[in-house]
Image (cartoon, grey):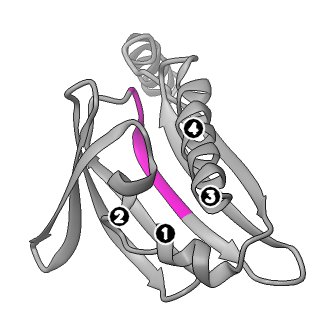
Amino acid sequence: MITVLKITLAALAAVSPLAAWAEQYAVERSLQITSSPDAAWNLIGDFCDIDDWHPAVSTCELKVIDGALHRILATTDGAKLVEKRVASEPGHSYTYRITDSPLPVEKYTATLSITRGDSSTITWSGRFSSDDPQSEALIAGIYETGLAAIRDQLSQ
């Protein structure tokens, strides 16, 4: 019994330095809007309109892959991302997952939504894992840049 325990502990000790445990992150940024929620949703609600409002996205192409809607994004610096829409509430939100990207993230899922009320709010939130300690700030910067561009376009 002790020999089996020693072997098991030795095997775990040998494997554990090789295992990379990614940190889990949750990022959320919000924007209060004074324009109508419908006007905001008209700007951001189509899954592939991100190239109309996010300054880092130059093109968006929709494709159905394995029966699911995907958007293929090209950024202004030439990077390519593939994102799969996994849920949608018309006029309210959509949720997507990154399936291919140069970003240092794994298991990335995000939601872009509008909360309607006396004071409507656009919220962009995401969860992901990463071994890169800068990834949280990187994703927050993407959200902040996008929300600032939405604010600017809605105030025109």
Task: Identify residue for label 1.
Answer: 43
Secondary structure mostly taken by the magenta-highlighted segment of the chain: strand
Q: Secondary structure at mark 2?
A: loop
- Mark 4–mark 1 Cα distance, whole angstroms, equals 15 Å
Q: Are marks 3 and 2 in contact (CB under 8 Å)?
A: no
- Residue type at mark 1? Leu
The quadrant in which the C terminus is found is: bottom right
Looking at the image, tell me whether mark 2 or mark 4 is earlier in sequence order: 2
Q: Does the magenta-highlighted stretch encompass residue 55? A: no
Nearer to me, 101 or 30: 30
- Disc marking residue 145: 4
Q: Is residue 77 left or right of residue 64?
A: right
Give the answer, above or below, for where 13 lies relative to 71.
above
Looking at the image, tell me whether mark 4 or mark 3 is earlier in sequence order: 4
- Mark 3–mark 2 Cα distance, whole angstroms, equals 18 Å
Q: Are marks 4 and 3 in contact (CB under 8 Å)?
A: no
- Residue type at mark 3? Gln
Task: Identify residue for label 3.
Answer: 156
Which one is in front in this view, the residue at disc 4 or the one at disc 3?
3
In the displayed image of the protein, which residue is found farthest to the bottom?
Answer: 90
Q: Does the magenta-highlighted stretch encompass residue 105? A: yes
Task: Identify residue for label 2.
Answer: 49
Give the answer, above or below, for where 118 lies relative to 152.
below
Q: Are marks 2 and 1 in contact (CB under 8 Å)?
A: yes
